[in-house]
Image: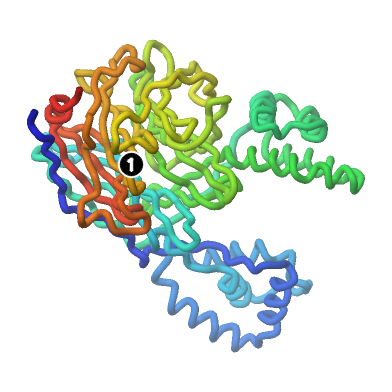
Amino acid sequence: MKPIRVRRTGLILKPDNSRVLLRSFNLTSEKRTQQTLRRIQALTEPSVQAELNLVLEEFDNRHHELKEFFLQRYEQLKPLILTKKAPSIERQLLIGAYFSQEYAVEGAALFNPSLVWHPDQSGVPEGSRRFVLSLRATGEGHLSSITFRVGVLDKQNQIALDPPTRFVSRPESVSYPRYERSLMEHKLRELDHWDELVASVLFSLNDTFTLDDLKSACQTVERQSQERRRRASVPLRSLMTLARANYKVAFSPQRPLSERILFPTSPAEINGMEDARFVAFQGENEKTTYYATYTAYDGKMTMPQLLKTEDFIHFEMSTLNGFEVQNKGMALFPRKIQGRYAMLSRQDNENIYLMFSDNLRFWYYKELLLKPVYPWECVQLGNCGSPLEIDAGWLVLTHGVGPMRRYAIGAVLLDKDNPLRVLGRLREPLLVPDTNEREGYVPNVVYSCGAQIHNNELILPYATSDCASSFAIVPIDDILSAME
């Protein structure tokens, strides 16, 4: 049997700590915030102007709309300013500056990439394809967000990446249209966060309601007796957290894709948006919608989420539901199979399962697909992104964990009409960390969240030791020939 020819491109995407995001800086208590505000209020106008000039001189060329952000922060702090006289515009800007900070979104790592074809293929030479690469960017506090790069594969599968802009831009929030009461009740019961007080809130609402409606109903409950308010605090927070986990954002179309950052927004994501597995899903009307399953992390609990976009400008995030929505590493098939959605999953930290559903957001049943078999995967088996459809079937990239917690990438082939039927499997890993890849934040790891096929070769973006990312090119025929 011929060895599999794996060509490492040598192209490495390293974290760039000069790409910084504006975010809020919050002190540890309201008391400290008010003390700081009083000190800023006590500054003379010449001192305010001088300090503001220094801030703008140092930071204005590092961010778009810096003053606008400062004024937004001032408006958020305005209720804590104990004066009836409105501060000067310069003092408002300076107050905003004192309660803002820069965050290096990829200061620590740029890893776990996922590749899909770009929705805009205009101007690309014949035989080439433009792609979008999503990556998990991690900065201070191990806080993860989703960032993007754009590149082109030519007919020889040479990769050219567009250089990213040094700026980083967050999207604007878009009001989530309406929530369905029945779905909210269903999810809360599923999470075991249902009690009489939550029921009283939801049953006071219409069949569909807005976030403002929900806030008002919760406030009504909180105005009740002190005892009931204490009882209500935890379940009602869960209710609001669930509602805010469903949201929409939009970027300015003028911002380059590499400048757009999906930064944690909802309480469920406050400690990170992890390992987005993107897939270009072909609907029954042949319309392409990009979905990504990702993990929302609040510091204690993980919650599988679904991202949806058609243009990488407008994004909608929503909760996944059902008894089998557990753990990490869910990966959606790129089309329905026999009229149903299909998803890979790993509920038990060890095995790969296959799920089917009539509803994209609800998953109730799973069937065991793959168990760890070979030495390099004895500890754990999982997927490395959505299945890839080829003539021979569904090509699924896997990751296995072996001795010394070494992660390696393998592959299996599933039947196209019945993906529960395994047609082939690599006995040896397709990719293992080499000498240059084994050192990093988490040593001895190669990992991917999604590859593509171009000119009969696997285009495999992969992370190296949870630090940086690279690409490997592998002939599809080599992979199939090596399968047992």
Q: Nearer the viewer, residue 478 or 207?
A: 478
Q: Is residue 337 left or right of residue 265?
A: left
**Location of residue 452 by image quarter:** top left
Q: Is residue 287 visible?
A: no
Determine the residue positioned at 69% across, 75% down. 37
- Circle 1 crowding by C-alpha within 10 Å: few under 14, some 14–19, many from 20: some
Determine the residue positioned at 23% across, 21% down. 424
Q: Amino acid at mark 1?
A: Gly
Against 168, residue 323 (above or below) is above
**Location of residue 180 by image quarter:** top right
Determine the residue positioned at 29% across, 51% down. 464
> Residue 394: where, in percent of width, then height?
28, 22
Element marked by disc 1: loop
Q: Is residue 432 visible?
A: yes
Q: Nearer the viewer, residue 252 or 245?
A: 245
> Residue 138: where, in percent of width, then height?
42, 56
Q: Is residue 24 left or right of residue 395?
A: right
> Residue 108: where, in percent of width, then height?
39, 61
Give the residue at mark 1. Answer: 402
In the rendered image, which quarter contains the C terminus?
top left
Against 386, residue 237 (above or below) is below
**Location of residue 218 by image quarter:** top right
In the rendered image, which quarter contains the N terminus?
top left
Query: Total of numbered circles in the picture?
Result: 1
